[in-house]
Image (spheres, helix red, strand yellow):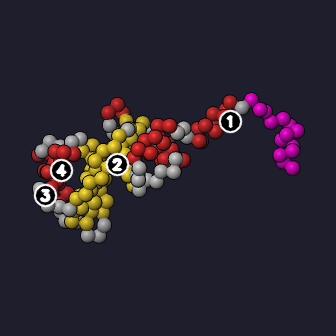
Amino acid sequence: MQSMTQFSVFLVNKPGVLSQVCRELGKAKINIVALAMMDAVEHGVFRLIVEDPGRARPVLSQLNIPMTETEVLVVPMANRPGALADICEKLNAGHVNISYMYCTTGATGGKTLGAFKVPNIKKAIRVIENRRLPTRDMKVKLRGSKARITPSRRAAVRR
């Protein structure tokens, strides 16, 4: 889990603009770790995280396309149903807002990477590392309970 630089490149909705950005990154041998593309009527926002932001910055700048940089939290997760929900629930329980997020489809070791835009990355890391999910804690407590419902208790509940 770490903070990484995300580039947001604002692209005019015209054929060839996205391919130009990707081609230039490819020519410079810059590997894209995660990406998301959102569109609006007149432009799209191409959000990407690369292995080496220092090398990507001049490549993107030379294209003369509007761009911003921000730090996002990148979290390795198991590539399984519910893994994203686990992280979102932990952040929710720690009162950490998620402005937006996106995931890769695969990373090293069968994992996936989630990129989270949060207001305080250090707090989000603490919350994720230290907070157990309340729903899981409750399931463990319920499983560990030796209490049995007797017929008299069952009758009392029905009343």
Q: Please report whichever mark, 1 or 3, sits nearer to the chain's N-terminal start.
A: 3
Span colored in magenta: 146-159
Cα gap from disc 1 to disc 2, whole angstroms:
37 Å
> Looking at the image, is 21 positioned above or below residue 140?
below
Cα gap from disc 2 to disc 4, whole angstroms:
16 Å
Asked if one can make out residue 113 in the rendered structure from this viewpoint, the answer is no
Q: Please report whichever mark, 2 or 4, sits nearer to the chain's N-terminal start.
A: 4
The disc at residue 63 is: 3
Residue 3 position within the rendered picture, expressed as x and y whole percent measured from the top left: 33, 43
* Label 2 crowd (10 A; few <14 / some 14-19 / many >=20): many
Q: Please report whichever mark, 1 or 2, sits nearer to the chain's N-terminal start.
A: 2
The one of 137 and 150 positioned closer to us in this rendering? 137
Q: Is residue 154 magenta?
A: yes
- Where does label 4 land, which residue? 57
Name the amino acid, label 3.
Answer: Leu
Image quadrant assignment for residue 149: top right
Answer whether labels 4 and 1 touch (C-beta < 8 Å). Answer: no
- Where does label 2 land, which residue? 72
* Label 1 crowd (10 A; few <14 / some 14-19 / many >=20): few
Tell which tag, 1 or 3, sits nearer the viewer.
3
Would you say 16 lies left or right of 127 here?
Answer: left
Q: Please report whichever mark, 2 or 3, sits nearer to the chain's N-terminal start.
A: 3
Residue 159 position within the rendered picture, expressed as x and y whole percent measured from the top left: 87, 50
The disc at residue 142 is: 1
**Residue at position x 25%, y 66% in the image:** 43
Answer whether labels 2 and 4 touch (C-beta < 8 Å). Answer: no
Cα gap from disc 2 to disc 3, whole angstroms:
23 Å
Name the amino acid, label 4.
Answer: Arg
Residue 158 position within the rendered picture, expressed as x and y whole percent measured from the top left: 84, 48
